[in-house]
Every structure is written in C-alpha cells, then in structure tokens.
Amino acid sequence: QVQLVESGGGLVQAGGSLKLSCVASERIISRYAMNWFRQAPGKERQRVVGLSWTGARTYYADSVKGRFTISRDNAKNTVYLQMNSLKPEDTAVYYCAASRVIEGPYDYWGQGTQVTVSS
C-alpha cells in the first residue's frame, strides 16, 4: 500500500513562507500526477495545485497563482509545495494526493499537515 507523508506545516505570520513536503513510500512520484489540496474548518476540500507525471501540465487555483509553486524531486520520491506571501485565508490542513491523471480520480492521500497563517 502506497503511503504519502506530508510535513513542513506550522504557524507563520501573514506575508511569510512555508515549504511543504510529501514523501511517498514507493517510487510513484515520477509515474503519477501529484496534487496538493487543502481544507479549512467548515469548508470543502479544495484542490490547490497539481503537476502531471510528465511535468508538462500544471494546475493552480486562482487564489494561489503567483504565490504557490509545486515541484518534484523524483530521486527523493518527494513533491514540494512552496508557499510565499501567505495570507490568513491560506490557513488549512494541506494534503498531497496522487492520481494517474492530473484531474483525478485521486488514488492515494496523505494524512495532512496543518498550516496556520496569523494576521
């Protein structure tokens, strides 16, 4: 069973940066599309960014364009989410997910990491 483990969350002031990591238990990062979702309290889970397995296609939600960047290190079996210029509304639990195609369905999920942005 593939496992995805996120890390890097924490508390940061508005305008600050965080870099999340998602490590896979098997070498799927290079063969799957990787996505980051987030879910704030009382809200639905939202797809934030995505990266196709070839790297040719990306997806960025309008709310994070120009601030968030997804990247991948196949050798480390890790996908990253660099988050800059963070806003209080970015506060959420962030999840990574793997899928055969960037649009889903999503086959594997991590357990999530909390990101809290203070004003």
Image (cartoon, rainbow, N blue to C red):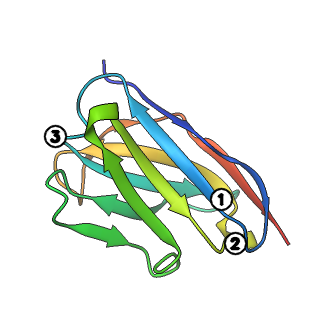
Q: Position of residue 60 (x, y in %)?
A: 38, 72
Q: Residue at x 28, y 23 (%)?
A: 26
At mark 2, the secondary structure is helix
Q: Earlier in the sequence, mark 3 or mark 1?
A: 3
Can you identify the residue that label 1 sits on?
40
Q: Residue at x 13, y 54 (%)?
A: 54
**Quadrant position of residue 17:** bottom right
Viewer-proximal residue among 113 and 19:
19
Can you identify the residue that label 3 sits on?
31
Viewer-proximal residue among 43 and 17:
17
Residue 45 visible in the snapshot: no
Which numbered disc covers residue 89?
2
Q: Position of residue 51 (x, y in %)?
A: 28, 58
Q: Residue at x 19, y 58 (%)?
A: 55
- Relative height, residue 102 to residue 88 (above, below): above
Q: Position of residue 58 (x, y in %)?
A: 27, 67
